[in-house]
Image (tube, rainbow, N blue to C red):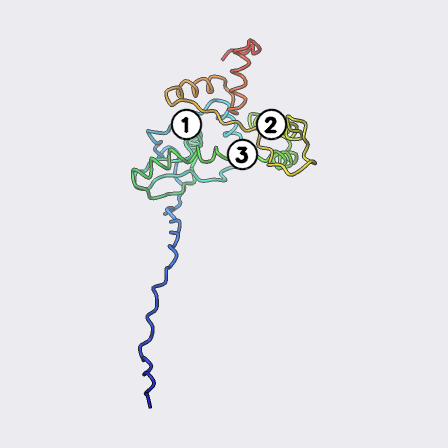
Amino acid sequence: MEKSPEKSTEKPKKKPSKKAAKTPKWSNRIVGHAEIPASEIKAHPLNFRIHPDTQRAAVSEALTRLGWIESVLINKKTGRLLNGHLRVELAAARGEVVPVDYVELSEAEERLALASIDPLGALAIEDPEKLSELLSGIEIGDSALDTLLSTSAQDADLARLFGEDDSDGATASEGPRLPNHGQNIAIVIAISDLGLFEKAIRNTGEANRGNAIMKICRKSLGEEDDEF
């Protein structure tokens, strides 16, 4: 009688499991908070933002009406200011104390932060419906800050107006549409011309860059009497 083959006692080897690569967590680079005299804060020597009088007046009024609702940002390693240059400058002229958030960044990271904080914020686009709803609950007067809000309200109204109909006559009721972002236009400017462009924008005295560009357009067409 033939013997049945002996069963192997060895356990089958497990195939190594492929673990999904973990996405690294975002590190918290904020290392402290303090309130210090504005006169002790060092502006960053590479700060590229220049603030026109209209913006200065609007920011000053916002600080008067609301107070400090956002800290300025300083790299603790270098002591240089990364965000909030205009607020610090205005506060220093009044002898004010400024709320500061400290971050700890290398020199290279500091440059990246300074170069990207404002441009990243500028990438946001507006929802005209929500902006209009927000501004409808604010009493707008004739101050610098109110003028800025009034301009935003007018922009929102125009955005909603142009968003009602497509250029080919199709309406929103005929099918789903993308959000009303058609009024946002990206302008590509050569690096070599950027300085000239920024200077022209500042010379108009307009806080809103879109208004500044339109003012330059009207001037070139002879439809703008104001000198700038």
Percent of width and height locating residue 97: 42, 37
Mark found first going from the N terminus, 3 or 2: 3
- Mark 1 to mark 3: distance in Å? 21 Å
Residue ranking furthest to the bottom = 1
Q: Quadrant of residue 104?
A: top left
Q: Which residue is mark 3?
A: 125
Q: Which residue is mark 2?
A: 155
Q: Mark 1 against mark 2, which lies toward the viewer?
A: 2
**Which three-letter amino acid code belongs to the residue tagged 1?**
Arg
Q: Residue at x 55, y 10 (%)?
A: 221
Q: In the structure shown, which secondary structural element does the residue marked by tag 2 occupy? A: helix
Residue 13 as seen in the image, left or right of residue 183 = left
Mark on residue 114?
A: none
Q: In the structure shown, which secondary structural element does the residue marked by tag 1 occupy? A: loop
Q: Which residue is mark 1?
A: 49
Percent of width and height locating residue 163: 64, 30
Mark found first going from the N terminus, 1 or 3: 1
Which quarter shows the N terminus? bottom left
Does residue 8 lie above or below 193 as drawn? Answer: below
Residue 225 as seen in the image, left or right of residue 174 = left
**Which three-letter amino acid code belongs to the residue tagged 2?**
Asp
Q: Residue at x 37, y 43 (%)?
A: 102
